[in-house]
Image (spheres, coloured by chain):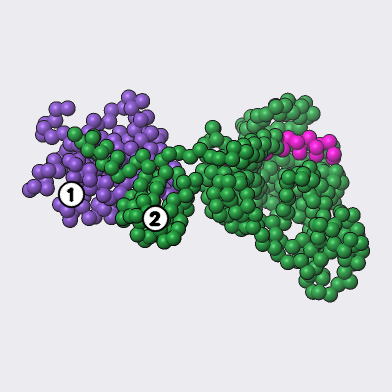
Amino acid sequence: MMDAGRHPRIKLMTCSEVVAVSGYMGNYRATIRTKPRYIREDLCVGCLQCIDACVFKKPRFPDEFNMGLGLRKPVYLPFPQATPQVPLIDPENCLQLKTGKCKQGCAEKCERKAVDFEQKEKIQEVQVGTIIVATGFKTVDPHKVPYYGYGKYPNVYTALEAERLVSASGPTEGEVILRDGRKPETVGIIHCVGSRDEKTNRWCSRVCCMYSLKLAHLIREHSGAKIYNFYIDMRTPGKGYEEFYNKLLEEGVQFIRGRVAEVTDWAVKPGEEGKLILRVEDTMIGQVRRIPVDMVVLSTGLESQPDAAKVSALFGLSRSADGFFAEAHPKLRPVETNTDGVFLAGCAQGPRDVPDAVAHAGAAASMAIALLNKGEVTIAPTTAKVVREKCVGCGDCLPVCPYTAISRVEGKAEVNAALCKGCGTCVATCPSGAIEGLHFTDEQLVAQIEGVLT
Amino acid sequence: MSVESGFDPKIVAFMCNWCTYAGADNAGVARMESPHNILAVRVMCSGRVSPEMVIRAFRSGADGVLVMGCHIGDCHYAAGNHRTAKRMPLLRNLLGYVGINPERMELAWVSAGEAPRFVEVTQAFTKKIRNLGPLAQEVTE
Ligand code: FES
């Protein structure tokens, strides 16, 4: 990430989003909106003294990167490796931005005069040849599976929260401390939350088994707790993954095959008081069991971003039934899309783990560069062509084109051959017969009809 | 083919390149039996089929016309078949005015994987046209 930030040929635009795209392969124009950071990237050197100087002496606001388990100030660096190493100010909580009344400790402290409360949203247009969409995924909202008690019992965590707890740079510096301050003695990790489930998402999210195993290993190592993993099937495809699973079996992590029915705090047997009780059918022994634990981790699955529909409209992408962006061909063209010059990388296209995402992104980058380096593109010969003399400029063809390849030039329609895919819908629409579908012209089709009928 | 009525209809079937044409191909590869009456005219997308083409087919002697494309949502060109879906029923309503029984024209979605459906649709349509008799007779009546 840092390397990308430093690379002379890579321009990183953070706090930014694409709001409009026009043009076609090799000639895209993207309109980009950059939100104010209130700290000037060109002046800031990343000393972070502004954070110390903030009038809020203590961090007070939930830290998004730590899933709200830690606190931050209104001026903050999102996470230690953030690129660029420039803090930002959160306008919702900053006294100066909210009320205009603040001592402005941060601005005073900054020797480089990088703090700029006057910064405004910026809109700019850039010309690009190819586009890679790598908008990632979202984890399933654990509230969608209410019977696991997330939000109701404080000691039910999502896997991402648990990951922050075991991280050395997390809010507890790697110590597993529950929301009530206790250290867990037993931990239950529930796989496939919001995955492989008729009620939420049907697909396997592919990464949860492995990250659940990682969490089991780390929580055990950091807290010495006894760990139960509840799984439907163990899916460990990948180099070294099955070996890791075997290692955990040897470490004594418990694996129970069965989907957990519910998590409650209703103690009915001795030893259950004050614990969370997981009710599960252990399908290996054919018995319903009650397992009391101190901490529950929900291995939430992956789904598409909530704004995927907007992004797909922006770049002309299609989406598969699961909501992720669709590739041009599931096996042979996994990084291309049906819009030429737009490529997909990573989980935007479907759930995948880090090595696979890196490989996918590498493929997308090479394809994007290869296309640009060629300098020219080969198009199919079956495009549409307007016969200018016949065109009356009614414009009926403009809205029917799925690729917006037709535009009005000097009152008459014109097809951009680089955009046209040759479906012929405009040919059939033109009331003046002014558009020819090359290789599928009216004459050719009529000849064919007459040919088959004689 | 010897038919009791002695009438062997000619049916022009417009098939889109990406779904139905491939579906028809697959039916052949799988050695399924589809009627020989179906005379394929390949177009890139069902959206290419103009009402005029359908009329031209009737005028050139077709007893029935089938327009086939991808299912809605599956069109290779995203929305080409949306046009077909609007255009063809409209044309069907107008056929009566020129003395052609609207039943002689049909729109059907058949995907590349639906070889059995291709056979089903074409067999049913052929049967229907066979029962209707030759178009020439209907128009002169
Ligand atoms: S490509 Fe089959 S209907 Fe458009």
Tell me where residue A408 appears, x and y as whole percent.
44, 58
Q: Is residue A373 visible?
A: yes
Residue assigned mark 2: A397
Tell me where residue B70 appears, x and y as whole percent.
39, 42
The purple chain is B
Residue in view at x 33 percent, y 50 percent: A428
Query: Residue at the left extreme?
Result: B141
Disc 1, SS: loop
Q: Is residue A200 visible?
A: no
Chain A palette colour: green
Magenta-drawn stretch, dominant element (helix, strand or loop): helix
Amino acid type, callout 1:
Asn
Residue assigned mark 1: B101
Q: Which of B137 and A231 is in front in this view?
A: B137
- Quarter of the picture containing the N terminus of chain A is top right
Q: Which of A221 and B9 is in front in this view?
A: B9
Q: Which mark is residue A321?
A: none
Label 1 CB less than 8 angstroms from ligand 1: no
Region in magenta: A203-223
Disc 2, SS: helix
**Residue B39 falls left or right of residue A48:** left
* Crowding at mark 1 (Cα within 10 Å: few <14, some 14-19, many 20+): some
Residue in view at x 45 percent, y 39 percent: A380
